[in-house]
Image: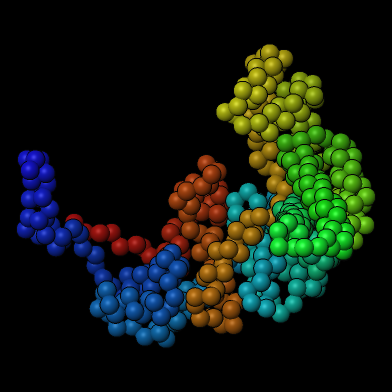
Amino acid sequence: MNQSVCAALDDLFSTEQADDQNKVLFSLPVTRRWLEQATLGLTMIARASMRGVVEFMRDVLGVPISLGTVHNIHQRAAQRAVTINDSVDLSAIRVGLHDELFQGAQPVLAGIDAASTYCYLLPAEDHRDGDTWAVHLLDLKARGLNPDYTIADAGTGLRAGQKRAWSETPCHGDVFHIHQQFETLVNIWARLASGARTEREALEVRLANPRRCCQDSLLITQLAELHLREARAHQLAKDLRTLAQWLERDVLALAGPDLATRRALFDFVVDELHQREPEDPSRIGTMRIALQKQRDDLLAFAGVLDDKLTAIARAVAVPDYLVRATCLLHRKPDTSDAFWQGWSRLHAAMGRKFYEVYAAVSQAMRSTPRSSSLVENLNSRLRNCLTLRRRLNGGRAWLGLLQFFFNHRRFMRSRCRERLGKSPREAMTGEDHPHWLTLLGLGPLQPRQS
């Protein structure tokens, strides 16, 4: 046997290796406060259930703790968290994202800052009508919330509430939901086309059976009809997918033409849907009506971006069309030849100003959100937290604690560099704050002792 292999086996089964497993690496002073920190850390960070905390304390730490004690620890923390949530100044928020989440049958009204992901609204209510939304939005306005605009889906209660509470604040449309609705329509017709093909193939196999001794004119006629139905279904599915891609990649894409051009393209897509509506009045008609009603709301982001690009052109003293071309350059991946060819052309046209223009356009695009998808992300995180734990104080206290945790837990990773290592509250206010456990009165964190 190879000498190095023998040495590796000796190290693997040596008693010294086993002794290292029992070596004390460091120690922690276990106090009552530390146990409360661990209790909240298990439920909030590790997403354990309250009964899971009881079992962990018993089996791993050898500490008996009742379910009621765990509940009381969370109740005290939640009361303090709600107080902190209500004291935060919201005047720094420029774009708000609103949506209605559903945990079971009960709606949860949600509001998030688009720039920092700070969650400023998360109450569970019995209703989601305009009056309910208006009451909460007026309370938020009293705390300094006065955004330039908000983004939301086509929910009637949500939009009615904002119109009552913030009559001067525009509510832009959410492109995420309309893309999702269109994609659902495309997938339905793709399945219908596939089903027509399967039915036609089955009938062809039946007719091709060598044991058949007669020609069935009825089946032959049915086969001809299936050929026509299959061809129409495949063509309609193809047309709908093309229209959906045009809407997503050209009309509602962030890097695209000016608002007037987008409106013309949008109307073209709606008109094409209208021409195909007789094929499926219920589904295609519903999609067409939704697009018609939401056109101005869905394209509102383009007007905001146009104003920013115009301001960049004036500030840097370059023609508007070059700034627009720089915006369109963002449609191409920076690993493609087309991107660097466009980069070279624009650099030749603007000279050293191009670097300033490119950086300004990139920042303008990053600061122009089009959807409320961050609220959908919150919903995915919220769902697991609510299904694993007992309700505190009718749900308000527990939601308040979750809202506090989401806002004060620092990002360990993020695609946005300005958020990395910061909490949403720090990103929103620009001010540091202590660890979230310390804010709840359970700090400071215990340092380990070597």
Residue 442 vs residue 223, the one in the foreground = 223
Where in the figure is residue 24, as x and y percent of width and height?
15, 61
Q: Is 8 rendered above or below residue 159?
A: above
> Depth check: 223 or 10 in front?
223
> In the rendered image, which quarter contains the N terminus?
top left
Residue 206: x, y in percent?
A: 73, 61
Residue 82, picture quadrant: bottom right
Residue at horizontal 55%, vertical 43%? 416
**Residue 179 in sight from this viewpoint:** yes
**Observer-nearest residue: 307 or 155?**
155
Q: Residue at x 36, y 63 (%)?
A: 444
Going by the image, does 216 lie left or right of 359?
right
What colour scheme does the image use? rainbow
- Residue shown at 61% from the left, 32% from the top: 333
Q: Position of residue 422 (x, y in %)?
A: 49, 50
Q: Quadrant of the C terminus?
A: bottom left
Q: Which residue is located at x 56 percent, y 76 percent?
A: 397
- Left or right of 161 on screen, residue 414: left
Q: Is residue 292 visible?
A: no
In the image, is residue 71 above or below residue 171?
below
